[in-house]
Amino acid sequence: MRHLIDILDFSPAELTALMDTAEDILAAPGKYAETCRGKKLATLFFEPSTRTRLSFEAAMYELGGHVIGFSEAQSSSASKGESVADTAKVISCYADIIAMRHPKEGAPLVAAMNASIPVINAGDGGHNHPTQTLADLFTIRREKGRLDHLTVGLCGDLKFGRTVHSLITALSRYEGLKFVLISPEELKLPSYVKKEVLRAQGIPYVQTTDLEGSLPELDILYMTRVQRERFFNEEDYLRLKDSYILTPEKLRGAKSDLAILHPLPRVNEISVAIDDDPRACYFKQVLYGKYMRMALILMLLKEAGRL
Amino acid sequence: MNIDSIQNGIVIDHITAGRGMRLYELLELDRLDCSVAIIKNVNSEKLGKKDIIKIDADIPVNLDVIGYVDPGVTVNTIREGVLVEKRRIEMPETLTNVIFCKNPRCICSTEQELKHVFKLTDRKNKVYRCLYCETKAN
């Protein structure tokens, strides 16, 4: 049974195939409108996440399927003490595919080990969020026409930002990448990612605290929010939350074909004055995320013999 | 110092000097009621000094524990005074309930029935990571 728990569960060739399917759906959505007729997606969200949940639900509805599930742990049997393993076994009797978000790292893997239907990790704490990475990759490919030979700047919370770790890991499999890691000292990329992903594969990177000075060389700028929920200490959060704010003035030195991405939600790290700039891609990224989730649901259901 | 040779049992040899007690504890040899000898700082041509554990019973030992604590150790099985098997133990690919994940954000911190599984992710640097949250073992 195939699942998507970590972005590395899929080979670059499989990712290309998924993006090709997403591209096809985008071009002719009507062709796919009944593909999942009679199929059910279970959205098991043990932690609130309106954006990701709605993206999955919209994806399944646009494929002609149905959605069941819950949007917080309090309304699930977890509040009665049911284990993730048992929940996965029970839901396997009701649905054809699961999208799970859970505050604990590794919970979707436990679900996948116990479910008899495909499981998609829709975010597990600060660990993985592979469908966000699918949206990121598809956005980069649509905007730049390629995933190789790019200088990618990642800015903000690189320590706790799971989307950053997943994106670096996913892009590290393409040739000619260079990373510019822009963050305050306290939120630098964890050393294990640098050592086991970047240095292990000889991928060049620079670490800096200077956003404005880094902008001119970037093809992609991936902005992130400093996430309150990842801090144990409120004082640390308040001190670091406004470290980087992208404004039209700072963008003056950037390339004219720079693509600005953000996993959203945005707080204040990208000025709304940039939203109309053609380089702002973060709302398109949301749309592309939905198409990638559609492609993913199709692929996993087909591989499970349910389509 | 004389330690009687064993007729039926296990000899764990070529233990890096100083690691014998840790192995004794992790293998839970204190629970056995047979004779167990830990010989420390034995002169060794290959290692300079080494520890040896002799167990006077042919019991199954957890080779994963041995491979994790001290890869390169030799486990000899002796039956009726004859060496019948000699195995050099390497680092195992997976450890189950040998070490435990301490990450409070990991699913295994709240689901008590879950086995604590660690995977070998970097053999050269002996790095094991939790299967669920990928936290590095200390």
Image (cartoon, coloured by chain):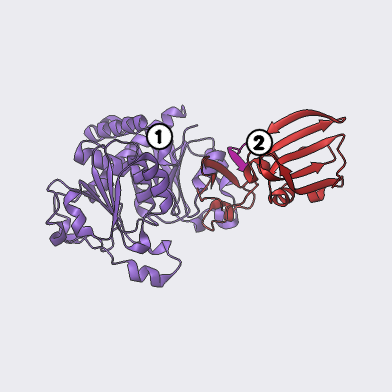
Q: Quadrant of residue A242?
A: bottom left
Q: Nearer the viewer, mark 2 or mark 1?
A: 2
Q: Secondary structure at mark 1?
A: loop
| Subunit ID for the residue under disc 2 | B
Which chain's colour is purple? Answer: A
How far from the left and from the top, in percent, is residue A284?
A: 23, 46
Disc tally is 2
Q: Residue at x 56, y 48 (%)?
A: A84
- Is the same chain shared between marks 2 and 1? no
User: Horizontal and vertical percent for residue A208?
Assistant: 28, 57
Q: For the magenta stretch, what is the residue range?
A: B89-95
Tell which chain the image draws in red.
B
Q: Who is closer to the viewer here, A199 or A157?
A: A199
Report x, y in % for residue A266.
Answer: 28, 59
Q: Identify the amino acid type marked 2.
A: Ile
Could you tell me what secondary structure mostly forms the magenta stretch? loop
**Viewer can see residue A212:** yes
Instruction: Name the spot of residue B5 as percent of width and height, x first.
Output: 86, 38
Circle 2 sits in a helix, a strand or a loop, which is it?
Answer: loop
Mark 2 sits on what residue? B89
Foreground residue, B71 or A23? B71
- Answer left or right for B74 relative to B31: left
Which residue is label 1 attached to?
A10
Number of residues whose C-alpha sits closer than 10 Å to that of mark 1, classed few (under 14), some (14–19) or many (20 or more): some
Q: Is B90 contained in the magenta span?
A: yes
